[in-house]
Image: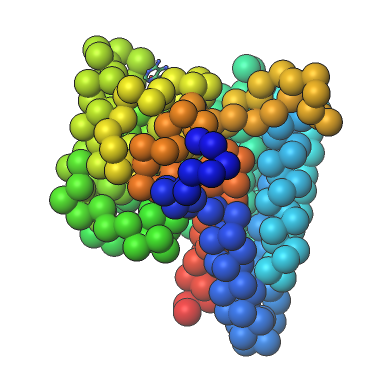
Amino acid sequence: MTDKEVQQFVILDGKKTSREIEVEIAEETRKLVPVVGRPPHLAAILVGEDIASRTYVKSKFKACKRVGFKDTLVTFDASVSQETILGKVAVFNNDPGLDGYIVQLPLPDHISVEIVTDHIDPKKDVDGFTPANFGKMGLPDPSLLPATSRGIMELLARYDIDTRGKHCVVVGYSHIVGSPVSILLAGPGKATVTVCHIYTKDLAFHTRQADILVVAVGKPNLITCDMVKDGVVIVDVGINRIPDSSAKRGYVIKGDVDFENVADKCSHITPVPGGVGPMTIASLLLNTLDAYKRAHQF
Ligand code: NAD
């Protein structure tokens, strides 16, 4: 697109929307604190030195501070045993002063994500990863929703994008994003959903049919201009660090969609960064507030 051309597509601005949600959360928190006697409290378990994980946790706690939540960070060496992590999980489960917590992924190979997740009290599972919360997602009365998927649904809703009867194509079927978002789109979203993954034959055939395309793979430029139809809504979940010596940090963040060449065909598209990422954090805060309210019978 040249400077002279008018931008036709709408940016689904996750940063702006998440800040609006934070204002709402902060307001509700201010009202509830005098009644409950303490603010909502979110904790995180961080294992090892992974720079990206540290950055994510830092952003989550900065957001906690903005809305008036208490936050607690517990860090462990990468060599920590699974038993020690499970011990901390048990302490968190039994702490009445803690409303929710996350175990930041990835974990070192000797620690089973499934076993650790299985031990998290579903009432405090603000990432929405436990089998109980995942299972309830498909029922009429869901509990804490997987944070990224909740963020995607919230972003679409706040831009008045009605998913009812639309053909949504989800690329990626991990239990973190692709699978839960396809369930939410088909269930409460009332959309017709096609799910694609690494074994899908002729990915472009499917993506070209999408009214709404959600891409959660982790491969830069997977979705190119010829793979989408005019007027599509695109939600790009991917986070890819591309080495770039001209960038201050030595890398730039890109999504899974070739934004520069695809955006012009879209009616709406999320940027990366500044799209789904901030909405995931906003949803973590919403889940923590929900857990806090449920624990205190609001
Ligand atoms: P994952 O590796 O667990 O799953 C990737 C999925 O993509 C799998 O289902 C796989 O079958 C599919 N896939 C791989 N190659 C494919 C191809 N060529 N064509 C079609 N499907 C293909 O990853 P994940 O945890 O779901 O994360 C996906 C991406 O989303 C990553 O970049 C991750 O960093 C990002 N992410 C972002 C947020 C956020 O808040 N923005 C949150 C979670 C994950």
Name which quarter of the figure residue 108 lies in. Answer: top right
Image coordinates for residue 258, horizontal then vertical, percent = 48, 27
Q: Residue at x 20, y 47 (%)?
A: 166
Q: Is residue 24 visible in the rendered structure shown here?
A: yes
Q: Is 237 left, or right, of 132 in this rendering?
A: right
Q: Which of 190 and 144 is in front in this view?
A: 190
- The number of numbered discs placed on residues in the rendered structure image is 0
Q: Is 285 left, or right, of 158 in this rendering?
A: right
Q: Which of 174 and 76 is in front in this view?
A: 174
Q: Is residue 271 above or below residue 37?
A: above
Image coordinates for residue 200, horizontal then vertical, percent = 27, 16
Report the residue that reaches farthest toward the front.
Answer: 4
Report the residue that reaches farthest toward the right.
Answer: 248
Q: Which residue is drawn at 62% across and 17% down?
A: 109
Q: Is 206 left, or right, of 263 in this rendering?
A: left
Q: Residue at x 80, y 23 (%)?
A: 246
Image coordinates for residue 264, horizontal then vertical, percent = 42, 38
Name which quarter of the figure residue 207 lies in. Answer: top left
Q: Is residue 96 visible in the rendered structure shown here?
A: no
Which of the colour schemes (rainbow, by chain, secondary structure, one colour) is used? rainbow
Image coordinates for residue 75, horizontal then vertical, percent = 79, 39
Q: Which residue is drawn at 52% across and 31% down?
A: 260
Q: Is 16 left, or right, of 58 in this rendering?
A: left
